[in-house]
Amino acid sequence: MTNCNHAGLPSAYSQAFRQVFAKYGVTDTQGVELLRLVHLVTNTYEQVATASADDSKLSPPRWRLLVRLLLEEEMGGSHVYPTELSRAQSVSKNTISAHLRSLEEQGLILRELDPDDHRQFRIKLSDAGRTLVQNATPRYMAFLNELISDLLPGEIEQLQSLLLKLRTSLVRHGRLDNLCEAHAVPSSE
């Protein structure tokens, strides 16, 4: 096992990183190290969740899309536009299109032309998609809870609070005031 520092970087790499940038007057690398760790955790989560998916129809991105469509239904909506899904998932329109095409081929979603704007498609769950996401979600949620089971409840709350604070800082400093609420991390309340 490689000896890693707190940011998940091999210690020798981390030291070299700091030394190189110290030559340019950069002595504080906490920002880049923290963001790298967040990225590392995100990528590791995606790899673990994908490898553990017992149903290829429900890779993490596809599961999130189906859950988003189910939530839309539960809140009284009848459909979602691909652009909304793209923003909510923080992925390109091309990526959303590929996922939607695959989900449609599997019979898990319905894509229909918007009667008011023939350039737009409206997306909603099919009966098969609704059944699949309803049946798989309890098992998937249990799996996600298992992934964080090494953390104490107070640590989970603290981590959520810190990540929300970091997100607020990123939005403010990135001048992303118009960032869609769909990107917000759900509250634990």
Image (spheres, rainbow, N blue to C red):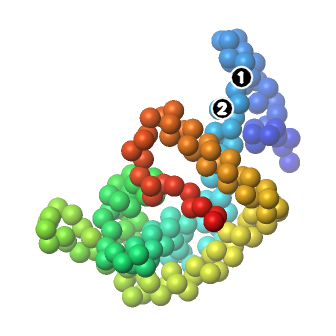
- Outermost front residue: 189
Question: Pointers 2 and 1 in contact (CB under 8 A)?
Answer: yes
Regarding mark 2 in the picture, which secondary structure is present there? helix
The location of residue 147, given as percent across then percent down, is 73, 65
3D distance between C-alphas at marks 2 and 1: 8 Å
**Residue at image coords 75%, 63%:** 148
Mark 1: amino acid = Asp
What numbered label is drawn on residue 28?
1
Left or right, 17 with reference to 54: right
Work out whether residue 124 can be spotted: no
The location of residue 116, given as percent across then percent down, is 13, 68
The location of residue 167, given as percent across then percent down, is 57, 45
Regarding mark 1 in the picture, which secondary structure is present there? loop
Work out whether residue 120 can be spotted: yes
Left or right, 9 with reference to 130: right
Mark 2: amino acid = Gly
Q: Which residue is mark 2?
A: 31
**Residue at image coords 28%, 74%:** 111
**Residue at image coords 67%, 69%:** 144
Mark 2 is surrounded, within 10 Å at the Cα level, by few (under 14), some (14 to 19) or many (20 or more) other residues, namely few
